[in-house]
Image (tube, rainbow, N blue to C red):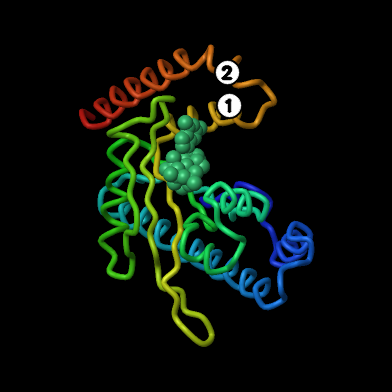
Amino acid sequence: MILERENQLNLNDIKQQMKQMTNNERDGENLSKLVSYYQLCKAAVNEFGAKLENLDSDYQVRHDHNPIHHIEVRMKDPASLLGKLERKGLNPDINNIVGNIYDVGGMRVITNYLDDVYTVEKNLLAQTDVKLLKRKDYIKNPKPSGYRSLHLVVTVPVFQSDSVQETPVEIQIRTVGMDMWGSLEHKLRYKTDVDEGKVSKFSEKLQGYSDEINSIENNMQKIFHDL
Ligand code: GTP
Ligand code: MG
């Protein structure tokens, strides 16, 4: 099951938002290249969506188990794209985006068990058209916040009308428990207007909850193996 995490932006909306944010200084050619790049990244997300769903059902047939609970997809909205470029000290130029921002298209693969995270990774990376660009394992090495997840940047060839483009997508693979913790912690930390001081008073607790969820998931995984 693939869920769209935010209302899907259409390419015209992206064009309008970009135009407004750059005070119409952006030349038309750069803008239309950017819209094409969004389209390309969206196509790459679709390719990975199909791959992951096929992988899940193949696994179900062979092993009588679904590694994937569900999948979420989102396209980075233009405001956060420009924000990210600014943080990296880069001009909002199409070449800077292509060379430096790998999460225009983003996916979350939520797995049932911990082992499933690495099963999904292994099977996806075994596909000959998929290339790994970046990998960060925040499960083996959780962030100080308690955040756990496996982050991959992978490319897939996207067949366009006149060319084939290797296109990157950021895929975060995590269990239902890690996803529950990550979504709620993100809302607490970033989405509310609570000041950082107030939130940091709770960081020890939040980190502890992450460990507790991890231990529960390990125990549930053991039951699954024993059955
Ligand atoms: P950016 O992609 O530029 O943010 O840098 P990066 O790739 O070095 O960052 P990282 O690998 O940490 O991934 C960033 C993404 O991971 C964020 O957009 C979040 O979705 C998630 N993330 C990272 N740290 C945390 C955390 O402490 N809490 C939560 N809830 N999510 C986190
Ligand atoms: Mg990132």
Which SS class for mark 2?
Answer: helix
Give coordinates of residue 163: x percent, y percent. 47, 84
Residue 169 % position (x, y)? 46, 58
Secondary structure state at the residue bearing disc 1: helix
Horizontally, is 20 left or right of 175 in the view? right
Amino acid type for the residue under numbered disc 1:
Arg
Name the residue rendered at 78%, 66% in the picture: 24
Q: Is residue 3 above or below residue 176?
A: below
Q: From the viewer's side, name the closer residue of 47 and 224.
A: 47
Which residue is more in the foreground, 57 or 30? Answer: 30
Q: Is mark 1 within 8 Å of ligand 1?
A: yes
Compared across the picture, whether 13 is left or right of 179 comes to right
| Residue at 38 percent of width and 59 percent of height | 154
The image quadrant where one finds the C terminus is top left
Side (left or right) of 126 relative to 6: left
Q: Is residue 142 above or below residue 120?
A: above
Q: Residues within 10 Å of mark 1 (few under 14, many from 20)?
A: some
The residue carrying mark 1 is: 189
Question: How many residues crowd mark 2 within 10 Å: few (<14), some (14–19), many (20+)?
Answer: some
Identity of the amino acid at label 2? Val
Instruction: Identify residue for label 2.
Output: 199
Mark 1 or mark 2: which comes first in sequence? 1
Up-down: is 37 above or below 219? below
**Do the residues under discs 1 and 2 have CB atoms within 8 angstroms?**
yes
